Image: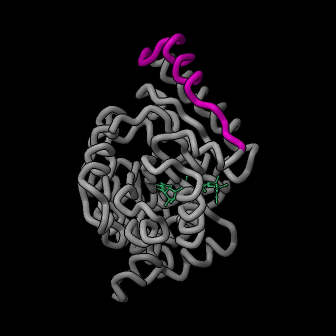
Amino acid sequence: MSIQRVMVIGAGQMGSGIAQVAATAGLEVLLHDMDPSLPEKAIEKMESFLDRDIKKGRKTEEKKNQILAKVLPSFKLKDAAEVDLVIEAVVEKMAVKVELFQRLDVICAQKTILASNTSSLPITEMAAVTNRPEKVIGMHFMNPVPVMKLVEVIRGLATSDQTFSTIRDLAIQMEKTPVEVNDFPGFVSNRVLMPMLNEAIFCVYEGVATVEAIDEVMKLGMNHPMGPLTLADHIGLDTCLSIMEVLYEGFGDSKYRPCPLLRKYVKAGWLGKKSGRGFYAYD
Ligand code: NAI
């Protein structure tokens, strides 16, 4: 099946990046958010991202205009009736995603594939609330989407081979490298990454070292491009906590216990870069 039109739901940090790479790959993109002011703002951010690419000689002004012309804000979920694929990138909460999938299942044409950019939640559970479980799949992009090459393509229990190959081919069209994984909590990326970030937060909590020192150890000692606390701030501490809770509940193993300091920061509204305060302060 060839994908021509896509709706991206959630115009936050991930949704805006996904909309940009989809438009760059030549798709018609509708960008929708429950907050009607966000799609326009995301398109403005996209423009400044593309301007940076022009300055670095990676894009032309003409290409930028072509990309921006392909992205339209959408103010009604009902617009999803017109698309071949929906990619949702709303908050990492199962109740929100399940409700959205139920509504989309009613709105969308039978051919439409429903994909989730979830970092950790079960694709099979989202598929089960629809009448098209064979057309539900995980399409997990990395942050920042225009830069990072990986897309984890997650097969739910009932995902068909046709849906899988359509999404794998689309990821390649978006100049990404798809990697197939099965549906288990945290998939591969966050099952391996997130316990490391949580452990770094435990090091802060237990006073093992300062935030800066922990990041320095991992950057210089392990050759990581970014320290774990900086990375947690970039991902969003609310998202990190949600993923740890999914691992903890999904495996029932205390090794995935979210650090109490992570919970405290999220309760305080210290969500990292997006809220201006996390382990570091941002302008
Ligand atoms: P974000 O907080 O920046 O954006 C979420 C957006 O969803 C907000 O604009 C919000 O208004 C909107 N939203 C919430 N409920 C909605 C609904 N019912 N209908 C329409 N819009 C709704 O979050 P972010 O970081 O973009 O994450 C989104 C998803 O992507 C999550 O599932 C997250 O786990 C996943 N993800 C996040 C990564 C990261 O590094 N932040 C990396 C890969 C995946």
**Percent position of residue 235, x then y:** 50, 56
Is residue 185 part of the magenta span, yes or no?
no
Q: Residue at x 65, y 59 (%)?
A: 277
Residue 237 visible at all: no
**Percent position of residue 245, x then y:** 47, 78
Query: Can you tell which quarter of the image residue 30 is in?
Result: top right
* Nearer to us in this view, 170 or 145: 170
Name the quadrant of the N terminus.
top left
> Is 75 situated above or below 140?
above
> Is 100 situated above or below 152?
below
**Percent position of residue 24, x then y:** 45, 27
Range drawn in magenta: 57-75
Is residue 61 part of the magenta span, yes or no?
yes
Its colouring scheme is one colour
Residue 216 visible at all: yes
Q: Residue at x 48, y 73 (%)?
A: 204
Q: Residue at x 42, y 60 (%)?
A: 132
Q: Quadrant of ligand 1?
A: bottom right
